[in-house]
Image (tube, rainbow, N blue to C red):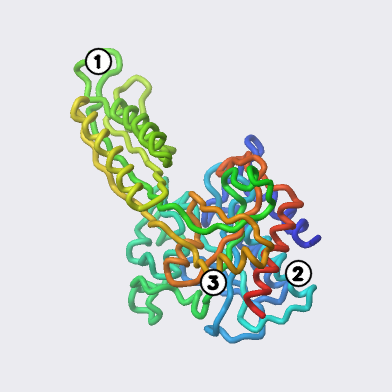
Amino acid sequence: MADFEGMWRDLAPIGRSASTGGYVRQPWHAAELELRAWFREAAAARGLTVEEDPFGNLAAWLPGHERGTEAVLTGSHLDSVLDGGAYDGPLGVVSAFAALDLLRERGVAPTRRLGVAAFVEEEGSRFGRACLGSRLAVGAATWDAARELTDREGVRLGDVVQGPGDAGDDGDGAGDGTGSGLLDGVATYVELHVEQGRGLIDLDAPVGVHDGIWPHGRYRYDIAGRADHAGTTRMEDRADPMLTFAMTALAANKQARVRGQRATFGRLDVRPGGTNAVPSQVTAWLDARAESDAELAALVADIERQATERAGRDGTTVTVTAESVSGEVAFDPALRDRLAARLGGVPVLPTQAGHDAGILQEAGIATAMLFVRNPSGVSHSPYERAETADCLAGVVALADALTGLVT
């Protein structure tokens, strides 16, 4: 298992903030590009063949089986949220390479094509669309639409990644929502991930299996008002969009709490942004999650209703745009049960976090997820953790799972 620890040491400094200890590994910026180079080096050191699709997704394949034949894929992503943790994403990729090493040590000869994947822009931290790389890979998103997405500096996705060329005219369907071809033949996908909650802590278990993903979405609130002087304008004469936003944030918190669901405003843009001026525009992004599609729809509708009612009192207007919505995902039950049994009856729990695994499952690929205990219970934060012993247990579990799938 020395390979796991060595790989982890190589990755630990990349994109780490000296001030916070958190990570900034946004797609197609320096840190993430360095991780992509590391992926290629790790694959080459193992004699794997690397493929990259037009969107930047990577897959490294063991030799011995032709492209397009029935395949098993494992892996995760390398990008992070802003000031995120070390383990969210890279743990799954490092563990995948380590699991392949363990299979070789055991003398396992795969009878199916086997590879390691690194999907791009899983977090949506740069271009605002979660699991964008896997969506494009399976055809759940089109390049024609994705290429126009912009980051916070106004840079277009189409200007930083090549894409399939002239969309719809390149012969592989990558521009018209039929996928990139990278996953041709993939019948099964297993993703290992650090746990992003306290389930395994409470159960005192190092490794578990996910059975599904809560539906979730990102919604942009554009709240328009009227810019004015902070000193000379009477309070009763204002059309202040910040007041509308403040009430909306409180409403989201209350609605989620009383339902036992999740609602978070984590990003805010205020224009013109002067300390001594009433703003003219507030744009805020809501992340909402619930245990069912119906619950999510009801939660989002009630938050929007309260925002609109408050806007009527404030003299402002609210426009809500659903930027990204993912429905409820149930992982393949036969595969889930098979893995849980093979791993000795490990806990089976749902997750409220989105993953590339959910996109692949919805595309018809039988998918399962393993997760490794996080003793902090915190994720998307520098406080995210995983003990080495638990990570190594995760590698063994992943290797055991893959052995059962490729032999």
Between 87 and 337, the residue placed more toward the observer is 337
Q: Tell me the quarter of the picture where residue 336 sits.
A: bottom right
Q: Residue at x 30, y 37 (%)?
A: 303
Q: Residue type at mark 2? A: Leu
Tell me residue 21's x, y (percent).
65, 39
Q: Tell me the quarter of the picture where residue 77 sits.
A: bottom right
Q: Residue at x 53, y 51 (%)?
A: 26
The answer to whether any part of residue 332 appears in the image is: yes
Q: Image height check: is 359 above or below 281?
A: below
Between 294 and 99, the residue placed more toward the observer is 294
Q: Residue at x 69, y 58 (%)?
A: 394
Tell me residue 246's x, y (percent).
34, 28
Q: Residue type at mark 1? A: Met
Q: Nearer the viewer, mark 3 or mark 2?
A: 2
Task: Name the mark on residue 102.
Answer: 2
The answer to whether the residue labelled 2 contacts the one labelled 1, judged by CB atoms less than 8 Å apart, is: no
